[in-house]
Image (cartoon, rainbow, N blue to C red):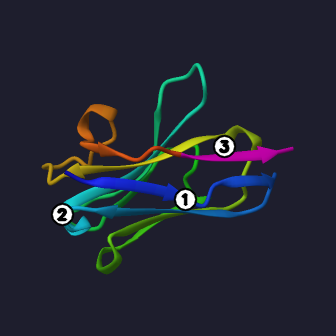
Amino acid sequence: QVQLLEFGGGLVQSGESLTLSCTGSGRPFSVYTMAWFRQVPGNEREFVAGDYWADGTKYYAQSVEGRFTISRDNTKNAAYLQMNSLKPEDTALYYCAVSGGRRPPPPRSISEFDFWGQGTQVTVSS
């Protein structure tokens, strides 16, 4: 069992930056793919960014490529999402999730992730 907690969300203006953090208890993060998802009310939860457990590959949704950066610190059981050049369409509830030791390709779908945090709200005003 892994318990995840996200923090760092808030209200920012368009073009500004924000960093989200995710900390966890349970098994070491090194055995998991870490990922961030986001969800807007009425829409499906969507993949944002991932850090693949096997080789450290970072991968992103096209909508955030070049603006967001995922990273992790396995010594702290923590993951981060640096978000730059934020846009109003980035407004959502952001979730941290972990996927246990899957074979390639790196997971992107909700069903491939085993544990989830409660989410942290990011609001970008225009």
Residue placed under numbered mark 2 in the picture? 27
Position of the C terminus by quadrant? top right
Determine whether, in the image, residue 52 is placed left or right of residue 4: left
Tag nearer the camera, 3 or 1: 1
Ranked by sequence position, the earlier of labels 3 and 1 is: 1
Q: Residue furthest bottom?
A: 75
In this rendered view, identify the residue nearer to me: 7 or 105: 7
Quick check: is 33 in the magenta stretch? Answer: no
Per the rendering, the mark at residue 7 is: 1
Q: Are marks 1 and 2 in contact (CB under 8 Å)?
A: no
Q: Amino acid at mark 3?
A: Asp
Determine whether, in the image, residue 97 is placed left or right of residue 87: left
Residue 87: % across, % down: 74, 47
**Gap between marks 3 and 1, in whole Å?**
16 Å
Q: Amino acid at mark 1?
A: Phe
Task: Find the magenta span and give its range.
Answer: 120-126
